[in-house]
Amino acid sequence: MKRSILILLIFFLAIPFSNAQLWKMRRWEVVTAAGPSFFFGDIGGYSRTENYLGFRDVSYLQTRYDVNVNVRYRLGREFNLRGSMTYGLFHATDERGSNENRPYESSTTFFEPAFLAEYYFVKNKAESSYLFQKRRGRFIWSILKSLDFYGFAGVGGIAYNVSGNDALVAKQALEGYPDSGFDLVIPGGVGATLVYSPNLNFGLELGGRYAFTDYLDGYTSQFSKANDVYYFLNLTVTYKLKTGPRGLPSFR
């Protein structure tokens, strides 16, 4: 009888401990993402009044897309590090904006490497559930217990190349504005993740970038008060890799 009670006590004490360590079995994650990119430079714009962070100028004409690949390493339950690589397009036009008499238009291709830190201010409970671990491949047993919310910030760079219309190319030649380059950016944003299974997450992330340049659209003006800003709104898919014996990702 005493032996049975001892076994039961060991069993119930061991499960919480093992559950708390489940995330350590999958420290490495590969994240793919895609969505619209929103650019706020000196070309285009619809608001002549105060326009905090550019959000008043969101429009279909200015919207393009980006694709993104990340490798994430989990330092703990609440803190992660990730390396990010993004390719995408920006577009800026004075058409139907507040500067129609200035007929500039530009298209920008860019590549952005970045290094980010994440903090999870709301962490899911499903990940530490023994039952969730066993119900592999089935739908989430509780949506509310399977959500993560996080913020992120970091440092990165942007390599860009601008193609302008004839009016913009003539202005660039006259003023000496650059049509390509590489500059520092400061990323920051928020995201939400739905833990679908022990191996797979889905999510949504809104990230903004402050660029240390005013030429991502190939143009600046005497009225410009700040450098360029851009945003991504991405759907994310996360695949979790098993952690090998030396803490490296395992592909088996």
Image (cartoon, grey):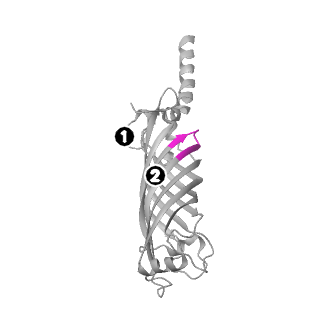
At horizontal 48% and vertical 35% (from top left) the residue drawn is: 26
Left/right placement of residue 247 relative to residue 68 reads right
Q: Residues within 10 Å of mark 2 (few under 14, many from 20)?
A: many
* Residue 170 place in picture, x, y as percent: 46, 80
In this view, the residue farthest toward the bottom is 101
* Residue 71 place in picture, x, y as percent: 48, 44
Residue ID for mark 1: 138
**Residue 6 figure quarter:** top right
Residue 203 has which mark? 2
Left/right placement of residue 140 relative to residue 158 reads left
Which part of the image, by quadrant, shows the C terminus?
top left
The answer to whether residue 44 of the structure is visible from this angle is no
Closer to the camera, 126 or 228? 228
The mark lying in front, picked from 1 and 2, is 2
Examine the rendered structure and indicate whether residue 195 appears above or below residue 5.
Answer: below
Residue 27 has which mark? none
Closer to the camera, 168 or 251? 168
| Stretch in magenta | 72-82
As measured in the structure, the alpha-carbon distance from the residue carrying label 1 to the one carrying label 2 is 18 Å
Left/right placement of residue 84 relative to residue 165 reads right
> Helix, strand or loop at disc 2?
strand
> Helix, strand or loop at disc 1?
loop
**Residue 103 figure quarter:** bottom left
Query: Is residue 75 shown in magenta?
Result: yes
* Residue 27 place in picture, x, y as percent: 51, 36
Q: Main secondary structure of the magenta part?
A: strand
